[in-house]
Amino acid sequence: MRARFASVDDGLDPIADKPTGLGRWSAIGLVVVSAAIGFVLVLIELALHPPASDLTTLATFLAISGGSTMLLVLGFRRFQFLVRLPSLRARLILGSVLTTTLALINVGFTAFLMFISAHDLALLAGLLAFSLGVSVFAASAITGPVVRSLRDLGTAVAKISSGDLKVRVPVESGDEVGVLAVSINAMAAKLEAGADKERELTQSRRELVSAVSHDLRTPLASIRVMVESLVDGVVDDQETADRYLRNTLSEVEYLGQLV
């Protein structure tokens, strides 16, 4: 339990403490690699009708390549290398490049083991390098709008937290980022409505206090004058004193009705 609530100052890495689900992803990886190998073997058998020994060799090479790739991917997931990068765009680009690189390595490794011609290997290496360069450009171009949308969300949330409740985030897509933008806009609208209602209630309270103060001021002043007259002996006849007392009682009853 302590590890769950421990802070960074305790010497624990908050990233490393996150669950990675390696068991589930290991099972998924085995199923995917096995299905991919089976699909490739069936496709080659139907298209080329190679000898059984060639199919066995190809299956072995694919198993080695796919297994190595799976272990590498699980290692990245276990140690959360991409999460440690400070930029989301860098994570997305690097993730895309790693995915493409792993695919190219699998193709190159299998081709290296299967091909005999050095000319074909050199040509394949050039094509793989070209594909990697294109994938870097594509990843950079594709992730740009996503990063900008997330940056806009962060800017909007910062403005809302500083008190600018009129800010709204443009909804440019229907994906998770768009749903988050809609939620932020709804939150800002509710906060703005609540702030407006609070201002109205505050104004109503001020008007009520002002009105009550005005209604209380006159009878209180009258009561004070009559009581001071009685206390100071200004009134010397009993009839006037009784009238002052009756008027004071009436004013008190009136105040009671106001309250």
Image (tube, helix red, strand yellow):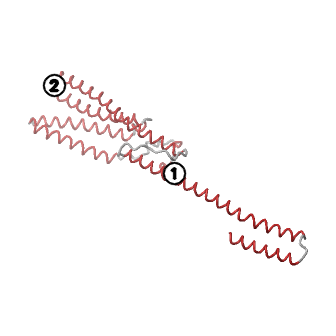
Query: Residue 13 shows which numbered tag?
Result: none
Instruction: Identify residue type, mark 2.
Output: Ile
- Residue toward you, 117 or 136: 136
Is disc 1 placed on a helix, strand or loop?
helix
Query: Residue 192 shows which numbered tag?
Result: 1
User: Where is residue 75, by image quadrant?
Assistant: top left
Q: Quadrant of the C terminus?
A: bottom right
Mark 1 against mark 2, which lies toward the viewer? 1
Crowding at dot 2, Cα within 10 Å, few <14 / some 14-19 / many 20+, comes out as few
- Residue toward you, 45 or 231: 231
| Sequence-first disc among 1 and 2 | 2
Can you give x and y, in whole percent of width and height, for residue 82 in the image? 39, 37
Mark-to-mark CA distance, 1 and 2: 71 Å
Judge from the rendering whether residue 236 lies leftward or rightward of residue 59; answer left or right: right
Q: Are marks 1 and 2 in contact (CB under 8 Å)?
A: no
| Residue under label 2 | 116
Q: Residue at x 30, y 35 (%)?
A: 99
Can you give x and y, in whole percent of width and height, for residue 63 in the image? 22, 38
Is disc 2 placed on a helix, strand or loop?
loop
User: Where is residue 198, by image quadrant?
Assistant: bottom right
- Looking at the image, the residue that sits furthest to the top is 119
Judge from the rendering whether residue 2 lies leftward or rightward of residue 176; answer left or right: right
Q: Residue at x 87, y 70 (%)?
A: 231
User: Where is residue 216, by image quadrant?
Assistant: bottom right
* 82 w.r.t. 21: above or below: above
Q: Residue at x 51, y 47 (%)?
A: 165
Judge from the rendering whether residue 250 lies leftward or rightward of residue 77; answer left or right: right
- Residue toward you, 152 or 127: 152
Can you give x and y, in whole percent of width and height, for residue 83 in the image? 41, 39
Instruction: Identify residue type, mark 1.
Output: Glu
Crowding at dot 1, Cα within 10 Å, few <14 / some 14-19 / many 20+, comes out as some
Can you give x and y, in whole percent of width and height, for residue 174 in the image? 35, 46
